[in-house]
Image (cartoon, grey):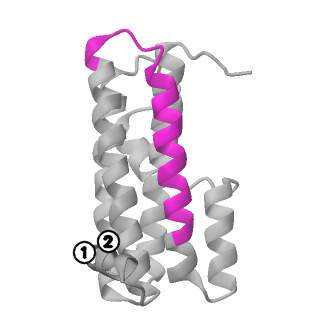
Amino acid sequence: MVKEYTLQEALKLAIKTEKESMDFYRKAGSITKDERSKKVFDLLANEEVAHLKAFFEHYRGKDLGDLPTLLNGPMDKLSATHQALEKAIAEDTHEQKALEIALQEEKACVELYSLMLKDIVDPLVRRVFETVIKETQGHYDMIEDEYMRVMTMVDRSDQDIYVRE
């Protein structure tokens, strides 16, 4: 059974999701040795901040505090994303695993936000969700490219050539 969200519930969930993603990318960037991967994680963290701010603008609840406090608040160490990253760090496979986790998270975000979008009537909030969905799909593509590079796979620009040969 699919849960129907009120606008404020959807925004709150989206804010929490973006905060979790931001924290994940910050942590992944801080432990990554590969400079290019570090830049990708840092870029993604900053873009998640922008998404979080866009959702926060429309959120009317007071339970999350103010935006600066939320942005600088502690990471949710019980989240599945954080737990998976900690496990990858312990196994010393963090760059590869962090990218794999990121791919899963971005895909899940697109699916969640697309589901929520169906019930959002407010045109401004719809636009926020639509924009974030599009940007999140871009994140997925960027992470996929970086994953292929880290795994010494074929670059996206060369995929068609290798697939056809």
Locate residue 152: give its quadrant.
Answer: bottom left
Q: Which mark is residue 157?
A: 1
**Label 2 sits on what residue type?**
Val
Q: Secondary structure at mark 1?
A: helix
Where in the figure is residue 137, as x and y percent of width and height? Answer: 36, 49
Q: Nearer the viewer, residue 163 or 85?
A: 163
Q: Nearer the viewer, residue 13 or 60?
A: 13
Residue at 48% across / 14% down in the picture? 119
Tell me the quadrant of the picture where the N terminus can be found: top right
Q: Which residue is mark 2?
A: 40
Residue at 68% across / 22% down in the picture? 2
Q: Residue furthest top?
A: 121
User: Do residues under tags 2 and 1 come within 8 Å of each other at their CB atoms?
Assistant: no
Q: Is residue 161 left or right of residue 84?
A: left
Q: Above or below — where is 46 with respect to 89?
A: above
Inspect this view and state whether residue 64 appears.
no
Q: Is residue 108 magenta?
A: yes
Q: Which residues fall within the magenta stretch?
A: 100-124
Q: Residue furthest front?
A: 165
**Circle 2 residues within 10 Å: few <14, some 14–19, many ≥20:** some
Q: Is residue 162 left or right of residue 3?
A: left
Q: Secondary structure at mark 2?
A: helix
Residue at 53% across / 13% down in the picture? 6
